[in-house]
Image: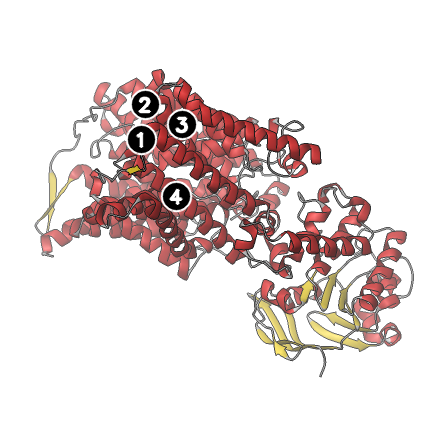
């Protein structure tokens, strides 16, 4: 057990070291890719936290968008700096999550899924409809940069990358601690047997909300990071297709362990870049991958890492979970 | 709102509701029978439109015949989907839904490659001219959708309530275990349900082909609406789906006329949220005891 | 006043009357058996008391405070916990995790403590308490085993451990010895008595196995068709002609008269 822990820590440190030197060895184009990669990791891991209760949502990307819009608006119209707007964006989206979770909680499983889709669409449509303040279909442009702090210009890719890396690591640390805590256990117990959980004092509705609000908060942070990197956002980059991509990452990587979604983002980002020449065929390719994984490897890639790397997560749980198809309980609704 | 506009809007609402109903019943049926949540339902609709494009616009076949061609074609697609996607993922609703999301991408790319992107397919209108009611002009092409839908929905009702095979579908939806015990083959029922789902979505698309721009993405917006309808109607309830379809048809059309299309969808979502708060099982959903 | 009371309880499902005008009074420290033929409403009663269903009419009073219509989690917080007729467990959790998660209710410390790592002492305290319960139920050697992998008898024991971990004062056991062989059954019976004695527990017991019921119950309430048929000391129940008639015709009769275990 201790050996595993030491190996894990070494593994994580090694990864962080690699991620820290990587930007200096690749073209600038790839540094931008890496920034998006890190943002997607925050998105995927926060999504998975919600999913540990058994709630798979279809509104997570839109919540990231909400964070993007929130941060952009605060920076543009109040002139606040990034280090303020980012956490505030997170908090805003957390509150949005709290607001929308009520009708959603009335449903479970598939009903919940579709309700989250509809509610998400409502939010996205409001960005399209209300030119003031969201900019309508064209979105927002001229989002203030993070600016120059000390002698570092965060407009440059590499400084922004390192800022993103630090933020990502902090977010992952928090999410990890939550996942391993008794709150995280409570989330998972709801997925395992929600009636049993309720009978031993876990207020299922409250905990599902809790997971949703926490996940939303981090989606908001990811959105803020995205907005200030891109400089411009529009409603269409937060659509259903992008949401399904998120699902692909989590399904390909696996959702039982903490590291699963990270693996999924990594593998799919690489594939995404490799298939860039085949651009028109790309969605088809990913459709095939999605179907393939769901039918043949529902446990995701993480289920292929049984004995060796126990980076995060509970060994026995993930071994057992590997037998189960990814996603919510069977025959729910 | 003046009378002419009002009548026009009512007519459009009925027409919208008819299309929605035709699309939604297949979705509700598939879901009711074996929790098959078909994300590619919008693409079934889209391909139905392309069937008409191919047979009528390109091939010169008479329009009604081209529409009928959509039935076996998309039904076959439904059967394939059931066999290759829903059967291996049976028992896991989300897996089936996400896998058909993959299918959506596949079908969209294929349609785009085969028939090209960019230009919307312009399909000549087979029935030109319009009827005038209370000063409102309504295109014949659009009017005929209503009787078509009524016939289709009537046929479905008849099938489900008076034909043995159809009654088997309903039995399966109520209680698959009991149905199996009575000798009903679950696989046959799921295949049948998806076949019907495909056929109906396809016909709806075929009927819309001369009216709506035919693109590989024309099914996208419809999908969300279709699922909202099924949820509002009560997950597995066909009658509920039809009722919800017309309610939503009216909501969408009136709000679009008075405000705009974006607001219409938003109001539709708000309506769904309202129903869920007041009656989580939907308009005609049954609570499982 | 009795620790736990059911007053005039009725529960209907649509047109079906599952429980009708039921009254019950349970004293602190009692082991009360609730028996009756299949379909008599015993599990429904548990489900209503524990908040899975709302009463149609009537009241449930615990420690003088009304409890009817509360959520299961709130009822558990008040100290009333039930086990399930089905083997309800967190199947992919280890034995230890199963019990730990049930400590949730009683473990202090919120989100911030969790994130900023100062919950270590609390965690260790919880682990100790969990281990105590696991020990008590005889599962220590299996504590890191997946719940799914346990043999049936141990799974039922774990179910009770999970319930105990939330520190109830009123424990409702729903057919705890289902599917157990005579040795396991005896073992469980002794454990239940020990729970009452050592943990100051009041226990409601639904069970078909008459030997168990006669063996440990202080008092027995008999239900039939959702109504209370008889109530009294074990021997009184055995001799009660109405009770015998209710069971007449079923294999339960044999058990009732002290023969082999009833087929549930």
Q: Residue at x 34, y 51 (%)?
A: B244
* Contact between labelled residues 1 and 2, with CB atoms less than 8 Å apart: yes
How far apart are the two marked residues, 4 and 1, measured between alpha carbons? 37 Å
Residue A172 position within the rendered picture, expressed as x and y whole percent measured from the top left: 50, 40
Q: Residues within 10 Å of mark 4 (few under 14, many from 20)?
A: many
Q: Disc 2 designates what residue?
A: B111
Subunit bearing disc 4: A
Q: Quadrant of the C terminus of chain C?
A: bottom right
Q: Is residue B236 visible in the rendered structure shown here?
A: no
Residue A158 position within the rendered picture, expressed as x and y whole percent measured from the top left: 36, 28
Q: Nearer the viewer, residue C90 or C221?
A: C90
Q: Residues within 10 Å of mark 3 (few under 14, many from 20)?
A: many
Q: From what the image shows, is residue C102 above or below residue B160? A: below
- Whichever of labels 2 and 1 marks the residue nearer the N terminus, that label is 1
Q: Disc 3 designates what residue?
A: A34
Q: Residues within 10 Å of mark 1 (few under 14, many from 20)?
A: many
- Whichever of labels 4 and 3 marks the residue nearer the N terminus, that label is 3
* Contact between labelled residues 1 and 4, with CB atoms less than 8 Å apart: no
Q: Nearer the viewer, residue A234 or B254?
A: A234
Mark 2 lies on a secondary structure that is helix
How far apart are the two marked residues, 4 and 3, measured between alpha carbons? 17 Å
């Amino acid at each position: 057990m201790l050996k595993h822990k030491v190996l894990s820590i070494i593994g994580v440190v090694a990864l962080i070291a690699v991620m820290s030197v990587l930007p200096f060895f690749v073209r600038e184009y790839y540094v931008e890719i890496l920034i998006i990669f890190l943002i997607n990791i925050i998105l995927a891991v926060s999504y998975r936290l919600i999913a540990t209760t058994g709630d798979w949502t279809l509104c997570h990307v839109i919540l990231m968008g909400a964070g993007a819009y929130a941060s952009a608006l605060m920076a543009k119209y109040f002139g606040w700096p990034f280090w303020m707007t980012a956490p505030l964006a997170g908090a805003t989206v957390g509150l949005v999550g709290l607001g929308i979770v009520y009708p959603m909680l009335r449903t479970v499983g598939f009903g919940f899924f579709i309700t989250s889709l509809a509610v998400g669409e409502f939010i996205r449509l409001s960005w399209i409809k209300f030119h003031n303040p969201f900019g309508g279909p064209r979105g927002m442009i001229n989002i203030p940069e993070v600016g120059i702090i000390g002698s570092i210009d965060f407009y440059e890719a590499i400084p922004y990358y390192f800022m993103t890396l630090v933020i990502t690591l902090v977010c992952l640390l928090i999410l990890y601690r939550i996942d391993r805590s008794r709150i995280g256990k409570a989330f998972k117990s709801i997925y395992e047997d929600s009636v049993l959980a309720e009978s031993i004092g876990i207020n299922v509705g409250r905990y599902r909300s809790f997971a949703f609000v926490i996940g939303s908060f981090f989606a908001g942070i990811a959105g803020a990071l995205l907005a200030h990197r891109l400089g411009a956002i529009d409603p269409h980059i937060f659509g259903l297709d992008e949401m399904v991509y998120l699902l692909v990452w989590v399904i390909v990587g696996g959702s039982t362990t903490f590291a699963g979604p990270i693996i999924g983002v990594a593998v799919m980002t690489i594939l995404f870049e490799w298939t860039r020449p085949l651009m028109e065929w790309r969605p088809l390719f990913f459709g095939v991958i999605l179907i393939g994984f769901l039918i043949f490897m529902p446990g995701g890639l993480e289920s292929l890492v049984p004995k060796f790397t126990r980076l995060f997560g509970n060994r026995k749980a993930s071994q057992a979970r590997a037998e189960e198809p990814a996603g919510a309980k069977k025959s729910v609704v | 709102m003046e009378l002419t506009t009002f009548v026009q809007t009512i007519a459009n609402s009925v027409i919208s509701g008819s299309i929605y109903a035709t699309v939604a019943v297949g979705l509700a049926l598939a879901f009711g029978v074996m929790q098959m949540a078909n994300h590619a339902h919008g693409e079934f609709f889209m391909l139905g439109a392309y069937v008409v494009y191919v047979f009528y616009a390109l091939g010169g076949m008479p329009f009604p015949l081209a529409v009928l061609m959509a039935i076996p074609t998309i039904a076959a697609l439904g059967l394939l989907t059931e066999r290759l996607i829903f059967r291996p993922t049976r028992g896991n609703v989300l897996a089936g839904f996400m896998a058909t999301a993959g299918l959506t991408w596949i079908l969209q790319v294929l349609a785009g490659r085969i028939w090209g992107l960019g230009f919307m397919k312009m399909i000549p209108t087979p029935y030109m001219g319009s009827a005038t009611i209370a000063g409102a002009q309504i295109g014949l092409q659009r009017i005929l959708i209503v009787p078509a839908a009524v016939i289709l929905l009537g046929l479905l009702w008849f099938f489900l309530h008076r034909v043995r095979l159809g009654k088997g579908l309903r039995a399966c939806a109520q209680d698959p275990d009991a149905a199996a015990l009575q000798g009903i083959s679950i696989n046959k029922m799921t295949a049948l349900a998806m076949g019907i789902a495909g056929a109906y979505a396809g016909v709806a698309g075929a009927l819309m082909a001369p009216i709506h721009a035919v693109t590989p993405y024309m099914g996208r917006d419809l999908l969300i609406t279709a699922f909202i309808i099924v949820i509002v109607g009560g997950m597995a309830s066909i009658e509920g789906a039809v009722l919800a379809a017309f309610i939503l048809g009216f909501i969408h059309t009136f709000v679009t006329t008075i405000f705009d299309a974006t607001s219409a969808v938003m109001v539709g979502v708000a309506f769904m949220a309202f129903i869920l708060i007041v009656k989580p099982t939907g308009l005609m959903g049954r609570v499982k005891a | 006043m009795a620790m736990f009371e059911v007053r005039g309880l009725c529960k209907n499902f649509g047109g079906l009357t599952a429980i009708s005008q039921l009254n019950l009074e349970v004293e602190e420290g009692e082991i009360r058996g609730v028996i009756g033929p299949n379909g008599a409403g015993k599990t429904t009663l548990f489900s209503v008391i524990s908040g899975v269903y709302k009463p149609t009419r009537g009241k449930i009073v615990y420690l003088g405070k009304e409890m009817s219509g509360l959520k299961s989690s709130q009822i558990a917080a008040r100290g009333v916990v039930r086990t399930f007729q089905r083997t309800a467990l967190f199947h992919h959790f280890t034995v230890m995790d199963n019990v730990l998660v049930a400590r949730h209710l009683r473990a202090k410390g919120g989100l911030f403590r969790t994130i900023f790592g100062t919950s270590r002492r609390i965690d260790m305290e919880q682990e100790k308490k969990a281990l105590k319960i696991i020990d008590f139920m005889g599962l220590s050697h299996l504590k890191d085993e997946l719940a799914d992998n346990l043999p049936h008898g141990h799974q039922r024991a774990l179910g009770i451990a999970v319930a105990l971990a939330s520190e109830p004062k009123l424990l409702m056991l729903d057919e705890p010895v289902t599917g157990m062989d005579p040795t396991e059954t005896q073992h469980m019976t002794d454990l239940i008595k020990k729970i009452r004695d050592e943990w100051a527990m009041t226990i409601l017991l639904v069970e078909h196995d008459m030997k168990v019921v006669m063996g440990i119950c202080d008092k027995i309430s008999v239900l039939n068709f959702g109504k209370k048929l008889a109530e009294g000391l074990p021997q009184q129940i055995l001799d009660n002609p109405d009770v015998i008639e209710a069971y007449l015709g079923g294999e339960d009769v044999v058990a009732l008269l002290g023969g082999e275990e009833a087929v549930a």
